[in-house]
């Protein structure tokens, strides 16, 4: 018995037309990616050029935005939240960042993010 070849998007579960096919580099699933500017189609993922390897990288929206697992996002704090969590002022925490004394991540937009576990435990500075 021959299997029907219905190509279904991993992200939105809709049928994927030939000009919309893309395979995610992370999960390997098919998703919508419009490769034709002259044809309509919504993207369910992205493609970009890896500047190191000069290769195209594909990722579906599921892998780009994994569903929040309980506890995971709660562990990521911005500067104000992180400062409150350790009893410091945001300015004092930022000074630690600039001194390289706390691990952090700065987003492309310039926002400082911290993981709860990386925060200086028990270090309470009061202005
Ligand atoms: Zn889709
Ligand atoms: Zn994926």
Image: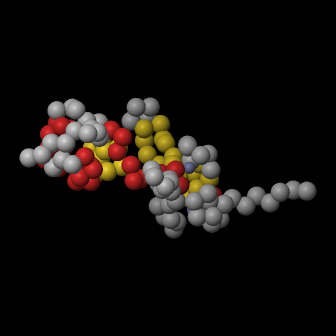
Q: Position of residue 38 (x, y in %)?
A: 49, 64
Coloration mode: secondary structure
Q: Is residue 28 left or right of residue 90?
A: right
Residue 110 versus residue 25: which sits nearer the camera? 110
Which residue is painted at 57% across and 59% down in the image?
11
Which residue is painted at 62% across and 53% down in the image?
30
Residue 8 appears in view: yes
Residue 89 versus residue 11: which sits nearer the camera? 89
Q: Position of residue 125 (x, y in %)?
A: 15, 42
The image shows residue 67, relative to residue 105, as above or below, that is: below
Q: Is residue 104 left or right of residue 71?
A: left
Which residue is painted at 22% across and 32% down in the image?
101
Quarter of the image with the N terminus is: bottom right
Residue 112 versus residue 25: which sits nearer the camera? 112
Q: Position of residue 116 (x, y in %)?
A: 34, 45
How many numbered marks does the figure carry?
0
Residue 46 versus residue 120: which sits nearer the camera? 120
Residue 109 appears in view: no
Q: Position of residue 121 (x, y in %)?
A: 29, 39
Q: Residue furthest left?
A: 127
Q: Is residue 1 left or right of residue 87?
A: right
Which residue is painted at 66% across and 60% down in the image?
8
Q: Residue furthest right?
A: 1
The image shows residue 123, relative to residue 108, as above or below, that is: above
């Amino acid at each position: 018995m021959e299997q029907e070849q219905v190509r279904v998007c991993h992200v939105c579960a809709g049928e994927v037309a030939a000009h919309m096919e893309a395979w995610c580099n992370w999960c390997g699933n098919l998703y919508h990616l419009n490769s034709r500017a002259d044809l309509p189609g919504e993207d369910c993922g992205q493609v970009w050029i890896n500047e190191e390897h000069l290769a195209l990288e594909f990722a579906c929206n599921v892998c780009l935005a994994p569903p929040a697992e309980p506890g995971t996002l709660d562990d990521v704090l911005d500067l104000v939240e992180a400062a409150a969590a350790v009893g410091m002022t945001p300015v004092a925490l930022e000074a630690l960042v600039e001194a390289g004394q706390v691990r952090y991540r700065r987003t492309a937009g310039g926002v400082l993010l911290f993981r709860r576990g990386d925060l200086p435990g028990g270090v309470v500075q009061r202005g």
